[in-house]
């Protein structure tokens, strides 16, 4: 395990009826940009309650709605413009990871003289940001408690992640009841996203990280248990609560610092989303089993790790590593594509041709060089082909 510094400044208010903590926004000033997506927060009543609380404490609200599932740089630019025009003091994101990601870059862009896309391409340019607050409505990305944001420019078929300690949320409200109305599709995709974050941290070449691995296995087993329950019983509080807390813990640094290597499945999926605008979690789910099989074929030394995954997460009783690893992939496929009803291949999410695979692989290759099993352009194309 190598050295690291970990700082999580985010105050978490977890559980039922936590929205009253929005009164804490008054500590950051008088004007708030409230950012959200479609009309779901109005249908379930969060919007009215949030506005009531903010106005009660004398906060002036400027709104930005319509944030996309894969948040676009155009929406970010609108938010930055609103912040500068109205002298906004803080940004409040009400929604899932897309809304929070957009809000983070808006908060940074409000303190930057150039174009916000600069900050997506190079997070080191984020020297300052407005305070960010969040109310989470979808368990998936972990953005409510991390320094990351992913933004798309579909005019260029580009989707990039940026990172800065300056955009970590100051406070996040995590009320599992706000996820009761999440659709089955998004519940499944969100759970797959959490699982992918955990697996990207779990499979590492760094040694001596028993704590991180054990925590990853705990998150993965929790997802395997509660994902199908949340899918089939949308208002099951314990299931929603466990998924919500797993979302935060999977990517806030707890299970990665000291043992992190570059991620590989995410860079590949970002290209799928950039070119085809598919649901992020579904893309991750489709690629993951194929990636495991590719790794085992390319480098047999990885088989033991995948066997350990099968034994410790899915409870597979098999002494032979190769057989156990193969059964682990089968169990993962059953979980994702049968228990959680996620589309099983790229054709099923509307990708009906392979014409962009080479270009996508070229763009993903640089991000996959330092991962658990380094991937070349040829490897990435092979994975796209197998997932097709």
Image (cartoon, helix red, strand yellow):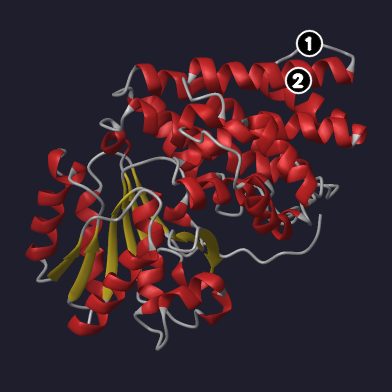
Could you say whether the residue bearing mark 2 is in a helix, strand or loop?
Answer: helix
Residue 357 lies, in percent from the top left, at 64, 45
Residue 170 lies, in percent from the top left, at 39, 65
Would you say residue 170 is visible in this rendering?
no
Q: Is residue 342 above or below residue 31?
A: above
| Quadrant of the snapshot with the C terminus | top right
- Res 311 quadrant in image: top right
What is the distance, in whole Å, between disc 1 and disc 2 at their CAs?
Answer: 6 Å
In front of the other: 99 or 91: 99
- Res 25 quadrant in image: bottom left
Q: Is residue 373 above or below residue 91?
A: above
User: Left or right: where does residue 327 sit relative to residue 220?
Assistant: right
In front of the other: 374 or 156: 156
Residue at figure coordinates x 31%, y 23% from the top left: 234
In front of the other: 216 or 99: 99
Pointers 1 and 2 in contact (C-beta within 8 Å): yes
Which label was assigned to residue 311? 2
Q: Is residue 88 above or below residue 388?
A: below
**Residue that extends furthest to the top in the rendered view of this protein:** 317
| Quadrant of the snapshot with the N terminus | bottom right
> Badge 2, how many Cα within 10 Å: few under 14, some, many 20+?
some
Q: Which residue is disc 1 drawn over?
A: 317
Total marks placed:
2
Residue 50 lies, in percent from the top left, at 16, 54
Residue 17 lies, in percent from the top left, at 22, 42
Would you say residue 110 is visible in this rendering?
yes
> Badge 1, how many Cα within 10 Å: few under 14, some, many 20+?
few
Residue at figure coordinates x 27%, y 63% from the top left: 92
């Amino acid at each position: 395990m190598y050295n690291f510094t970990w700082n999580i400044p985010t105050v978490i208010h977890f559980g039922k009826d936590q929205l009253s903590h929005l009164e804490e926004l008054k500590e950051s000033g008088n004007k708030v940009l409230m950012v959200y997506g479609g009309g779901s927060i109005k249908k379930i009543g969060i919007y009215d309650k949030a506005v009531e609380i903010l106005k009660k404490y004398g906060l002036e609200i400027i709104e930005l709605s319509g944030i996309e599932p894969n948040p676009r740089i155009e929406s970010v630019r609108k938010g930055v413009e609103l912040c500068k025009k109205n002298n906004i003091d803080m940004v409040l994101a009400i929604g899932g990871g897309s809304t929070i990601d957009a809000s983070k870059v808006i908060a940074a862009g409000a303190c930057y003289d150039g174009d916000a896309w600069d900050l997506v391409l190079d997070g080191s340019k984020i020297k300052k940001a407005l305070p960010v607050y969040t109310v989470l409505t979808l368990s998936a990305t972990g953005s409510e408690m991390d320094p990351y944001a992913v933004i798309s420019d579909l005019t260029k078929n580009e989707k990039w992640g940026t990172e800065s300690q300056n955009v970590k949320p100051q406070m996040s409200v995590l009320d599992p009841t706000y996820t009761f109305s999440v659709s089955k599709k998004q519940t499944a995709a969100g759970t797959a996203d959490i699982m992918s974050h955990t697996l990207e941290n779990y499979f590492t070449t760094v040694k001596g990280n028993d704590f991180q691995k054990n925590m990853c296995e705990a998150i993965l087993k929790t997802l395997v248990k509660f994902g199908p329950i949340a899918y089939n019983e949308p208002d099951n509080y314990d299931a929603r609560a466990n998924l919500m807390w797993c979302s935060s813990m999977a990517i806030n640094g707890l299970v990665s610092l000291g043992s992190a290597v570059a991620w590989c499945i995410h860079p590949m999926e970002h290209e799928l989303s950039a070119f085809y605008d598919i649901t992020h979690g579904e893309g991750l789910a489709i690629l993951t089993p194929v990636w495991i099989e590719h790794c085992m074929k390319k480098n047999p030394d990885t088989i033991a790790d995948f066997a350990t995954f099968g034994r410790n997460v899915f409870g597979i009783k098999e002494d032979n590593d190769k057989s156990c690893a193969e059964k682990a992939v089968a169990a993962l496929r059953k979980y994702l594509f049968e228990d959680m009803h996620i589309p099983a291949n790229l054709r099923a999410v509307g990708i009906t041709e392979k014409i962009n695979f080479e270009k996508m692989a070229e763009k993903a290759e640089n991000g996959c060089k330092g991962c658990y099993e380094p991937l070349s352009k040829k490897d990435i194309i092979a994975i796209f082909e197998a997932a097709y």
